[in-house]
Image: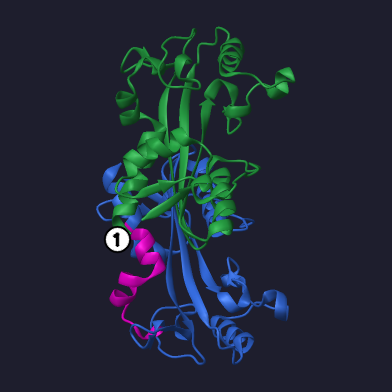
Chain colours: A blue, B green
Amino acid sequence: MQIILASNNQHKKEELGKILYPHTILLPQDMGISFSCEETGKTYIENAIQKAQTLYKQIEKPVLSDDSGLSVEALDGRPGIHSARFGEQETGKKLNQKEKNRLLLELMGDKKERKAAFVCCMVLFINPLRIYAVQETLEGYIATEERGTNGFGYDPIFYLPQYDKHLAELSPEEKNKISHRGKAAKRISKLLEDI
Amino acid sequence: MQIILASNNQHKKEELGKILYPHTILLPQDMGISFSCEETGKTYIENAIQKAQTLYKQIEKPVLSDDSGLSVEALDGRPGIHSARFGEQETGKKLNQKEKNRLLLELMGDKKERKAAFVCCMVLFINPLRIYAVQETLEGYIATEERGTNGFGYDPIFYLPQYDKHLAELSPEEKNKISHRGKAAKRISKLLEDI
């Protein structure tokens, strides 16, 4: 099946293409379509469905979308769905990832309770009536310092006790096996086998 | 696993209990909990998640919920998520199912385009970060008269060309194999096997 990803991210296309093979993943731009979508939902699922719906209206073909973030218990779930834009409100400017990581470490200070989870909601939108959503997590702890150079986003400050490593210290293969996005993609892959 | 169904419907508990065996399905009342939930969502998924969330807040254990309805193309998707309350606005009173079926036939008149789909969204809510939603359909046509005494709801006026029968003329076993709710429950069952 040909599935269009509601995203402009070439990296996501490649990563998902591998997991969802033999299905073909295309970006809107591969079809000459310009895609953009406001994210006004209050949850990962709402945002992922919003992206899928927006693209489906343009192409009327099966669409895949995702929304992800980092949810920190001691911060009442923040940055959560605002992970990509984290710090903009607090500082009045757009932060780069290093600045976001430092802001998060600062907010956590020396809190004892450091539980956190990466969350990924992936939506397979076959048509407006036939929809699948899977939301998976990777549980761990906010570390007290950055470590590791693999991965991206908040990976350097995310500690995994079962490895005694930060997520950014895992290889891409190790990370894909346990990650929120890897698990969600594998479930979507199973769904695609069935339908 | 013990899963609590966000519903007060004994019939649903039994039907799902069979499909999801060996998992045990309980109703809130089986645990001495009173459950009620407003449905303010604009989609099946929103309503199903709302039900699951409401119950999860009370019990903090894995919850199953569903929302379903009949979507008629020529009526712009109505009665849709309002299928259970259909006709209340139009007539100012609560209709029984026979009255709802007649109102729908009346609205359809002699329209040529009679495509419709039963829709069921089922949500498995493991915790607020780990959520699965599957939305399945049963496609058919709005008939011009009622036929059959099996099933419930709009089944007597729903025509299935592949059987040349109305849905209410199928046996419960035949219906479960092809129905929106049967298909959604089977997917949830597969998910439960994996997790």
Q: Residue at x 30, y 49 (%)?
A: B190
Given residues B20 and B110, the one toward you in this image is B20
Given residues B53 and A109, the one toward you in this image is B53
Residue B11 vs A104, above or below: the answer is: above
Q: Position of residue B56 (x, y in %)?
A: 54, 56
Residue A86 among magenta residues: no
Task: Kindly report the secondary structure that dominates the magenta region of the rendered protein.
Answer: helix
SS for dot 1: helix
Residue at the spot of label 1:
A19
The kind of residue tagged 1 is Ile
Label 1 resides on the chain identified as A
Q: Residue at x 31, y 16 (%)?
A: B163
Left or right of A34 in this view: B186: left
Residue B2 sits in which quadrant? Answer: bottom left
The magenta span reads: A168-186
Left or right of B13 in this view: B83: right
Given residues A96 and B98, the one toward you in this image is B98
Left or right of A26 in this view: B49: right
Residue A141 vs B139, above or below: the answer is: below
- The quarter in which the C terminus of chain B is drawn is bottom left
